[in-house]
Image: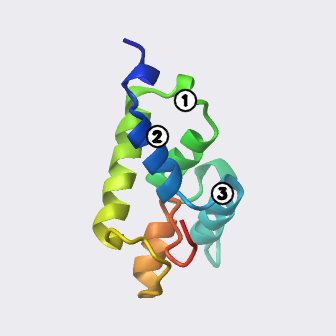
Amino acid sequence: MAVSEQISDTLWNEFHTVVNMTSRELQEWLNVESAGEETEQLPDQSGKATGRRVLEILGKRRTDLTEDDVKVMQRVCEIVRSQRGPDMEPQAGGTGWRHGLMDIGHDPLKPV
């Protein structure tokens, strides 16, 4: 069975709902997050590993996803669900909390 056949519509839709930042927004965020006073990482190496993986997944078609991509999608959905609750209404929180979610493509201040 192809990996694309293993991805349920539910996972595909949930991932693309909880990742409410565009590829461009996420790339810019990862670049800003990794920029330091003295150094700045290369654009393709900036940000946390999961955030870079989310960015890669956003650039893929469903038929091109790998098993590892599916695991990342599931993990991102689990993280957002556990930290946001069922209503997913825009909400403010602590800076660290918001930035942690933004690192994986979810801005809690944006509507989903």
Residue type at mark 3 is Thr
Q: Which residue is mark 3?
A: 22
Residue 99 left/right relative to 45: left
The vertical placement of 38 against 45, above or below, is below
Instruction: Examine the image and state in which quarter residue 73 appears.
Output: top left
- The quarter in which the N terminus is drawn is top left
Residue at image point 54% right, 29% down: 62
Asked if residue 51 can be seen in this view, the reply is yes
The residue at which mark 2 appears reads as: 12
Given contact means CB atoms under 8 Å apart, are the residues at marks 1 and 3 in contact? no
CA distance for labels 2 and 3: 16 Å
Amino acid at circle 1 = Arg
Give the residue at x 55% y 24%.
Answer: 64
Q: Mark 3 or mark 1, which is nearer the start of the sequence?
A: 3
Name the element at disc 2. Answer: helix
Is the residue under label 2 in contact with that under label 1 (CB below 8 Å)?
yes
Q: Is residue 40 visible?
A: no
Secondary structure beneath label 1: helix
x 66%, y 57%: residue = 22
Which residue is the site of mark 1?
A: 62
Q: Are marks 2 and 3 in contact (CB under 8 Å)?
A: no
Sequence-first disc among 2 and 3: 2
Q: Please tell me whether residue 22 is drawn above or below residue 92 in the rendered image.
A: above
| Residue under the point 47% across and 87% down | 92
